[in-house]
Image (spheres, grey):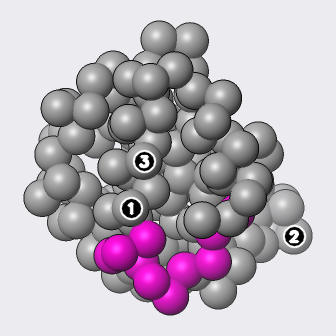
């Protein structure tokens, strides 16, 4: 585990740390080709420099975010922000459905919007896959 991610996990409560650990292990296992690091203060996975998935501590939960998640056609993922992101929030490790997570990660590999070049394109997102 990257030291910055390990440090991120160590700052969480026991409940949140368990959620983060399960998310980390599942994401790494299902996206072995992805680069991962702490980006904008939370763990994020990238494919070819494009952010794919990450998680962060919010006031009352751990939020799992898929940058292109609105295109996954998954009712358990909720719209987040003004672009194509979607999220799932967890307050307990038992709420993490690993089979759903694996399916979402597979979709994350195959459905991608180009966030890497968002600024260069002045806020216009283009579909990569």
* Residue on which the image places disc 1: 25
Which mark's residue is nearer the viewer, 2 or 3? 3
Q: Is residue 110 visible?
A: yes
Q: Does 41 sit above or below residue 50? A: above
Distance from Cα at disc 1 to Cα at disc 3: 6 Å
Distance from Cα at disc 1 to Cα at disc 2: 33 Å
Q: Is residue 82 visible?
A: no
* Residue on which the image places disc 3: 21
> Magenta span has 31?
yes
> Is 110 positioned to the left or the right of 5 in the image?
left
The span picked out in magenta is: 28-38
Q: From the image, which quarter does the C terminus lie in?
A: bottom left
Q: Earlier in the sequence, mark 2 or mark 3?
A: 3
The residue under the point 61% across, 58% down is: 44
> Magenta span has 16?
no
> Is 50 positioned to the left or the right of 3 in the image?
left
> Is 110 positioned to the left or the right of 46 in the image?
left
The residue under the point 63% across, 36% down is: 10
Q: From the image, which quarter does the N terminus lie in?
A: bottom right
Residue toward you, 68 or 16? 16
Residue toward you, 74 or 6? 6
Residue 109 image point, x, y percent: 39, 79
Distance from Cα at disc 2 to Cα at disc 3: 34 Å
Residue 75 image point, x, y percent: 17, 41
Crowding around mark 1 (Cα neighbors within 10 Å: few <14, some 14 to 19, many 20+) is few
Q: Does 42 sit above or below residue 39? A: above
Label annotation for residue 120: 2
SS of the residue under disc 3: helix
């Amino acid at each position: 585990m990257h030291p910055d991610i390990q440090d991120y996990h160590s700052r969480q409560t026991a409940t949140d740390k368990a959620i983060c650990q399960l998310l980390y292990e599942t994401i790494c296992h299902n996206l072995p080709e992805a680069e991962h690091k702490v980006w904008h203060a939370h763990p994020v996975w990238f494919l070819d420099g494009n952010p794919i998935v990450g998680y962060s501590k919010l006031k009352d939960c751990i939020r799992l975010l898929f940058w292109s998640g609105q295109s996954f056609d998954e009712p358990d993922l909720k719209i987040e922000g003004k672009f194509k992101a979607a999220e799932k929030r967890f307050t307990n490790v038992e709420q993490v459905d690993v089979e759903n997570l694996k399916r979402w990660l597979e979709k994350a590999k195959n459905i991608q919007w180009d966030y890497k070049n968002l600024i260069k394109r002045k806020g216009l997102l283009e579909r990569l896959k």
